[in-house]
Image: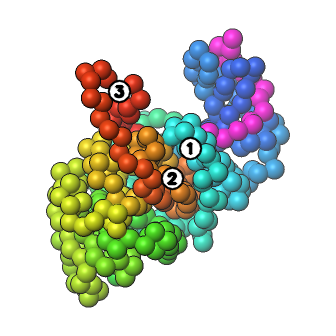
Amino acid sequence: MPVAGQRLRLEITDLAFGGEGVARVDDFVVFIPFTAPGDVVEAKLTEVKKSFGRAELVRLLKPSPERVEPKCPYFGECGGCQYQHLDYAAQLRWKHRQIGELFRRVGGFDPAVVQPVIPCPNPYHYRNRILVRSQWNKPARKLNLGFMRTDCGLVCDIESCAIAEPALNEAITQWRRNPPPKGGIKTVLRLEAPGWEVPEHSFFQNNFLLLPELVRAVKERLRSHGARHLVDAYCGVGFFSLEVADAVESFVGVELDVPAIRAARRNQESRGIRNGSYVAGDTDQVLPSLMSRWDPARTAVLLDPPRVGCRPPSLEVLRRTGPGQILYVSCHPATLARDLKILCADGRYRLETVLPLDMFPQTQHVECVADLRLAGPLPEPVASGEPDRGQTVLSPAPAIG
């Protein structure tokens, strides 16, 4: 049994979801950040559990054919990126494999349902929003300005970000010239979304370059089902419902963020779109009334929740009301697979396809569009006082990430 502090010569054979390379010593699994499948490394064990451990890379003995030189001088110290040492084509292949494995392990789905990952047109300089922090560095007697480190709670002092859009790097320069007065301050640097009104604290996709492909994917799946009505849950500033408004007769969006709903209405007005409306409210509470507006068989529901996924009440409403199609957009494949398993339980829904889009190159994250179709009736409740042994338990969504 390996022990903490031990140094091992290891061959990396896999890449776990989250970005860590995977090696094995007999049945003992070792996770090592910033390694690539095919690497042979010397690693030092930092944590040892019963069946797995974590280690830090000490020395690269033999590089993988998939390994490349990172473009960012802070890679490995800054915690923003996990994959800059991997060739971009390899990143796409490994993300595809990771998503398929998560869907098999978490959701019980056939990995073949996951399509190849759509690449970003530019795998660097794509991000339009970043969160930077200030922190007093007591030993150096200076203010560190940048991102959280990967190995601790300290801030990595940075002058630029390789995945941020060029205009944001100019903003970083200006921010550093006029720094916050003290440590512990978070600052959001954000580019305006062309043609969209987005309040300061409201959500908008972080990658403008791949937005056309994301819209195309959603609209294509929506039209393939032929739904006449759309419920856009967690609608934000109305991005999806306004982009696909021409594919349905009518739509309604719901969002808890009141400034975002006001912006959605103004975005709708500026586009002259007349076949929909927006409602401010909690999706869990408002969804039942929205689902009663139209024939469920002719209604599609689009879900784009936070990365923790949907809460059980909304999933329960969808299973009970049975819209003909559910399109689920998620940046966290694990919570997506978990929620799809609940929706598909007892054959209620069928998972048609999952289309991943690499909205976050160089990082562990990936956006997915899942298409569910109504497949069967809702099982009858158990008549006796005995519990239903096959019933899916709807537990609160864990706070992942």
Kindly identify the residue that appears in the image at 71 percent across and 43 percent down.
36
Point 56% across, 36% down: residue: 105
> Residue 296 colored magenta?
no
Q: Is 398 displayed left or right of 114 in the figure?
A: left
Q: Are marks 3 and 2 in contact (CB under 8 Å)?
A: no
Q: Which mark is residue 351?
A: 2
Task: Please name the residue that numbered disc 3 is placed on.
Answer: 388
| Foreground of the two, 310 or 66 | 310
- Amino acid type of the residue that numbered disc 3 sits on in the rendered structure: Asp
Write down the residue under mark 1. Answer: 109
Residue 9: within the magenta? yes
* Of pointers 1 and 3, the one earlier in the residue sequence: 1
Q: Is residue 43 left or right of residue 328?
A: right
Is there any visible trace of residue 78 in the rendered image?
no
Please tell me which of labels 1 and 2 falls first in the chain: 1
Q: Is residue 378 above or below residue 71?
A: above
Tell me residue 331's x, y (percent): 46, 53
Under mark 2, the amino acid is Leu
Which quarter of the rendered picture does the N terminus lie within?
A: top right
Q: Position of residue 191 (x, y in %)?
A: 38, 71
Residue type at tag 1: Phe
Q: Quadrant of residue 198?
A: bottom left
Q: Looking at this rendering, what residue extends furthest in the bottom direction?
A: 272
Q: Specify few, some or many for label 3: CA neighbours under 10 Å numbering under 14, 14-19, or 20 or more.
A: few
Furthest-top residue in this view: 1
Separation (CA) of disc 3 from disc 2:
24 Å
**In the rendered structure, which segment of residues is drawn in magenta?**
1-17
Q: CA distance from mark 1 to mark 2?
A: 8 Å
Q: Position of residue 21 (x, y in %)?
A: 67, 38
Find the residue positioned furthest to the front.
Answer: 383
What is the x, y in percent for residue 106? 51, 37
